[in-house]
Amino acid sequence: MMNSGKPIYTLTKDERIYAQKRIDVLFAGSESFIAYPLRIVFSRREPEEGKPLAAMLVSVSKKRFKRANKRNSVKRMVREVFRLHKHRFADVSATAGISLDVAFLYLKDELPSFAEIEKSMLKTINVLTDKLTKKDPDEGNS
């Protein structure tokens, strides 16, 4: 499939973080902030040829939802919102000249609405844009 200037609305395996080594790197050398009900943990990496500029991981704690169907429902919703807005993450990454690994950790004890997750995702994009394009002296604050 050729990309004719239009975003491609799929979520490929390359756009998901699944390797334990990469997950360890993401959580070890990363920055974080909260866009309630999500906690966002992100790390920068060198862009690779043929790989997407933004990759994601979703985590919903068993402590929050005992039942797997509810955890899976939240994860599906977050993945869907990311899929719809991934071109914005790629734009932020391209502007900063890096690739991004982003983990979305769900914090709330109740099931979210789609609008709530989307609002949180848009806030995430704005905060990442600010953090990656402006070199703040107080970058360590999270």
Image (cartoon, rainbow, N blue to C red):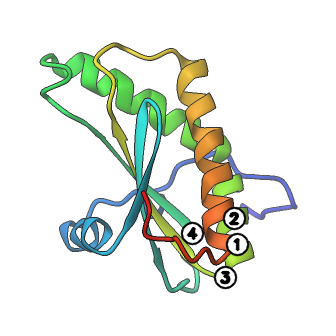
Classed neighbour count for the residue bearing mark 3: other residues with Cα under 10 Å, few (<14), some (14–19), many (≥20):
some
Residue 133, label in figure? 1
Q: Residue furthest front?
A: 138
Q: Is residue 111 above or below residue 88?
A: above
Which mark's residue is nearer the viewer, 1 or 2? Answer: 1
Real-space Cα separation, disc 4 to disc 3, in angstroms: 13 Å
- Which of 5/74 is in front? 74
Q: Secondary structure at mark 3?
A: loop
User: Element type at marker 4?
Assistant: loop
For the residue pair 127 and 83, the one nearer the viewer reads as 127
Q: Earlier in the sequence, mark 1 or mark 2?
A: 2
Q: Amino acid at mark 3?
A: Gly
In the image: residue 77, left or right of residue 111: right
Going from the N terminus, do you reach mark 2 or mark 4 first? 4
- Amino acid on which the number 2 mark rests in the picture: Val
Residue at the spot of label 4 = 52
Label 1 neighbour load within 10 Å: few <14, some 14-19, many 20+? few
